[in-house]
Image (cartoon, rainbow, N blue to C red):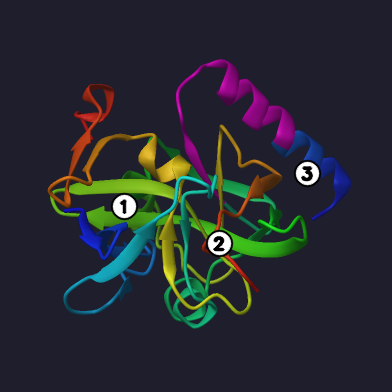
Amino acid sequence: MSKIVENALRSYLAKLEEERETKYIALKEGKILAEAPNLSELAEKLKELGVEPRGLRILRSSGIKGSVRGGYRLSV
Amino acid sequence: MPRFIGLTPAIELIIRNPFTGRAYPERGSVIAIIDTGYEGFLLIPSDVFDTTFGELESERREIILADGRKVRSRGVFGEAILEPYVVDGFIETVEGVNEFVVGAEFLESFKLELDYCTKTARLELCPQHLLY
């Protein structure tokens, strides 16, 4: 994905985060296809649009932490 | 519902990719260890991840191990089903992991009570999550 698209996406996610309501967003080839408050509704919308799941990228408005602690169970 | 395996609390759940309908396991449920030291949502073995979420594009991040080493994980947003609840979260894997672990991000939706006297455990959805 180009840097311009990635930056536009990050701005959009930041705007959603400001609204303080979790939203899930589905993208394919850098294009936003649908958004919904939970994965179940998002999957339903994509099904109605006839979108194939292969290559789908799902993001959440609140994002994910870039680094987390693994706990004592994780030993690789 | 949660229970103790020896002295370790665990829960039974089903992992689901809502975009393909694929679930693991296909029948019954899998036991996931509760580890509050893991800050993520759900950690699963790589083969289960690839089978269940292989079509989706993964996100990558860093996991810090107990000994300070860092490893890369890959993950996607998916569903953890604990009848009657469905919880959305970031499901990830690291090469070499062979068990299922639920962490603090998963537990933040629940009230978890562990009674080591009687070896019983209870899990209730937080009031603010009851609508979903």
Nearer to me, A43 or B103: B103
Nearer to me, B43 or B54: B43
Measuring 34% from the left and 63% from the top, which residue is drawn there? B32
Residue B127's place in the image compared with A5, above or below, is above
Mark 1 — residue? A44
> Residue A56 bears which disc, if any?
2
How far, Cα to Cα, is label 1 from label 3? Answer: 25 Å
Q: Determine the chain carrying the residue at label 1.
A: A
Tag 1 and tag 3, C-beta contact below 8 Å: no
* Of the image marks 3 and 2, the number of the one nearer the N terminus: 3
How far, Cα to Cα, is label 2 from label 1? Answer: 14 Å
Q: Are marks 3 and 2 on the same chain?
A: yes
Q: Determine the chain carrying the residue at label 2.
A: A
Query: What secondary structure is marked by label 2?
Result: loop
Q: How many marks?
A: 3
* Of the image marks 2 and 1, the number of the one nearer the N terminus: 1
Nearer to me, B4 or B25: B4
Q: Are marks 2 and 1 on the same chain?
A: yes
Q: Specify start and end residues of the magenta stretch as a single range.
A: A10-26
In magenta segment, residue A20: yes
Q: At which x and y percent is residue B29?
A: 22, 71
